[in-house]
Image (cartoon, helix red, strand yellow):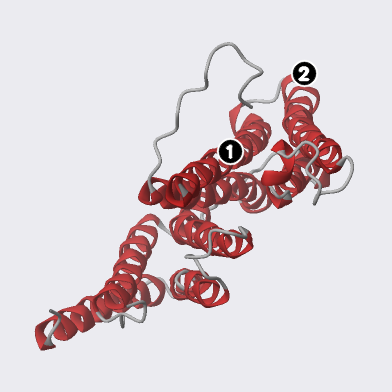
Amino acid sequence: MSGLWRFPFPKLPSSAALRTAGIYTSGALFSLGFFLPLDASIYSKHRSGGNVHVTIVDWLPLVCSMLGMLVINSIERSRLLADNFSYSGGGVAWKAKLVLFMGFALMAGGLAGAATVLIMKYVVPGYPWPTLGFGIAGVVGSACIMLSSVVLWVSQNIEEDYSYNLSL
Amino acid sequence: MAGLKTIIALSFVLAIGFLLVILSSALYSNYYPLLVVATYILAPLPNAICARCSNPDDFIDGAGNGVLDFGRFLTGFFVVMGIALPAVLWHSQIIVMPAMVMSIIGGLLIYGTIISFLMFFQEDTNF
């Protein structure tokens, strides 16, 4: 990370409490991202009188986002920066970056897919508000999961600073 | 630091929380809000389990910390789920508005009781 960019990255505040709060926030955002589409789905089943309903197509982008989040956060983070340490074997950093790329692609694909479903299924045929809301819930849900992943990533990087300071 | 008065106050708050949740179901003879109780009882469990599985003082291998973080993540998930579940049910007109309000407040009271009980009466095993 250091030595490549001319501008130094701003130092994250390193505190264990902030990190814990970040992880709780991340879980809360994930929950929000799950329950918004669930709300749209239950609403469409129980209350909406229209003939357009939430189907499996609306859920697929969300599943993609969740899989992406799982992949991104399963990677051991220290392997990303360890370029060619002797214990890590050849190209572990490269493999980790490849898996990370697939995770990000899954997540971005989920968001893009949700936007596609919103446009193709709800905006182009010109449905009115309660039906349009199903598509918007999908997009907001995917965005929430993305945000949750970002918060989780950032707060776990706080942890690395913290342990580094301690070990010095 | 925590004596008999704390226990009595906490049990009162717990009873009020359960009263609100049960009232929100029984008044409208619609027992979906009881799910909130299950959610909030589940909420402190991941932290308790993951704290046993990991050693937060171990900075050498980060594996233990990952388990701890997962527990916190699940706790955050469950707490928001306890609020979101009645809201979703209300939005779909499965339960009515007062039932939603009562079950959310009751659930928060129950969860707050559990958390403060754990905070007050936790045994210090670290030192």
Q: Judge by depth and name the residue closer to the eye, B23 or B1.
A: B1
Q: Which mark is residue A88?
A: none
- Residue B97 visible in the picture: yes
Label 2 resides on the chain identified as: A
* Placement of B3 over or under A117, stated as above or below: below
Which quadrant of the structure image shows residue A98? Answer: top right
Q: Element type at marker 1?
A: helix
Eyeballing the image, is A135 above or below B116? above
Amino acid beneath label 1:
Cys
- The amino acid type of the residue labelled 2 equals Val
* CA distance separating discs 1 and 2: 24 Å
Lower sequence index among marks 1 and 2: 2
The quadrant the N terminus of chain A occupies is top right
Residue at left 73%, top 48%? A75
**Along the line of sight, which residue is nearer the eye, A90 or A62?**
A90
Horizontal side, residue B53 vs residue B117: left or right: right
Q: Mark 1 points at which residue?
A: A144
| Position of residue A119 in the picture relative to residue B108 (left or right) | right
Disc assigned to residue A124: 2
* Crowd around label 2: few <14 · some 14–19 · many ≥20 (10 Å): few
Of the pair A114 and A51, the residue shown nearer to us: A114
Q: Which residue lies furthest to the right in this view?
A: A90
